[in-house]
Image: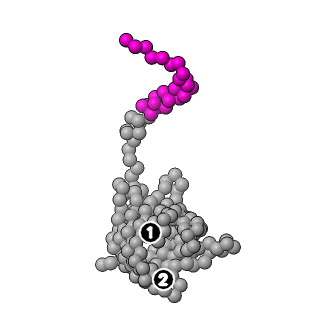
């Protein structure tokens, strides 16, 4: 039988590696046994958006149309949006992922589209009446550089809502950039 030689071995590194392996071995059964999170009332509010919606996009004096499909996914925890439309005469495709972070007690969202290689990441809360959600975040600005944004979604009724994006200028003031009026398809 051969003996193991530790000559030339960095003993502190060896002990750290063994400790890490031991910790992973102990933690794995606990992680596997955890119950997955369940959707809460905040997720139910997102679920109400499921379906296909027609979109009227206004940016300055320009108007265009689009269609968005909302669907809850990943165990009912995330609302996935697929948007197809036109901006400035060019086809536009975007995808969103919205959910609720119970640790932060905030709604969270990520948006990506065919006009940018950087995501827009935002978080926010509803007003007391539950009619308007305000999200703030950062993403690519019109010049491609990181910019701060504020977005509001006002829920008019079960079949219509208006999303408005405001850009934060160098002076710190918000100015409207664009809006989208959504009407549920029947």
Residue range highlighted in magenta:
1-26
Q: Is residue 4 magenta?
A: yes
Q: Is residue 131 visible?
A: no
Q: Is residue 28 above or below residue 183?
A: above
Spatial CA distance of label 1 from label 2 is: 17 Å
The number of callouts visible is 2
Q: Does residue 152 appear in the picture of this structure? A: yes
Disc 1, disc 2: CB below 8 Å?
no
Q: Is residue 182 above or below residue 31?
A: below
The chosen color scheme is one colour
Query: Residue 34 colored magenta?
Result: no
What residue is drawn where x is 52% and y is 59%? 106
Residue 169 location, quadrant:
bottom right
Q: Is residue 45 above or below residue 66?
A: above
* Placement of the C terminus among the 4 image quadrants: bottom left
Q: Residues within 10 Å of mark 1 (few under 14, many from 20)?
A: some
In the picture, measured across the screen, residue 56 lies left or right of residue 10, that is: left
Identify which residue, 11 or 56, lies in the foreground.
11
The tag earlier along the polypeptide, 1 or 2, is 2
Q: Decide whether the magenta segment is chiefly helix, strand or loop.
A: helix
Q: Nearer the viewer, mark 1 or mark 2?
A: 1
Give the residue number, with chain letter if any, for mark 2: 58
| Circle 2 Cα neighbour tier, 10 Å, few/some/many (<14 / 14–19 / ≥20) | some
The residue at the point 43 percent across, 62 percent down is 97
The residue sitting at the bottom extreme is 61
Asked which quadrant contains residue 139, the reply is bottom right
* Residue underneath mark 1: 113
110 or 49, nearer to the observer:
110
In the displayed structure image, the side of residue 110 where residue 150 appears, left or right: right
Residue 103 lies, in percent from the top left, at 52, 52
């Amino acid at each position: 039988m051969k003996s193991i030689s530790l000559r030339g071995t960095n003993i502190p590194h060896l002990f750290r590696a063994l400790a890490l392996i031991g910790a992973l071995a102990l933690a794995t059964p606990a992680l596997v046994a955890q119950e997955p999170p369940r959707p809460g009332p905040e997720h139910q509010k997102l679920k109400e958006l499921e379906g296909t919606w027609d979109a009227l996009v206004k940016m300055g004096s320009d108007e265009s149309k689009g269609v968005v499909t909302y669907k809850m996914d990943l165990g009912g925890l995330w609302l996935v949006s697929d948007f197809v439309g036109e901006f400035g005469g060019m086809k536009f495709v975007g995808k969103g992922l919205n959910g609720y972070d119970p640790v932060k007690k905030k709604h969270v969202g990520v948006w990506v589209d065919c006009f940018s290689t950087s995501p827009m990441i935002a978080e926010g809360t509803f007003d007391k009446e539950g009619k308007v959600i305000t999200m703030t975040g950062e993403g690519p600005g019109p010049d491609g550089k990181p910019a701060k944004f504020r977005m509001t979604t006002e829920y008019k009724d079960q079949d219509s809502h208006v999303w408005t994006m405001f850009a934060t200028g160098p002076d710190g003031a918000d100015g409207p950039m664009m809006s989208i009026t959504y009407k549920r398809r029947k």
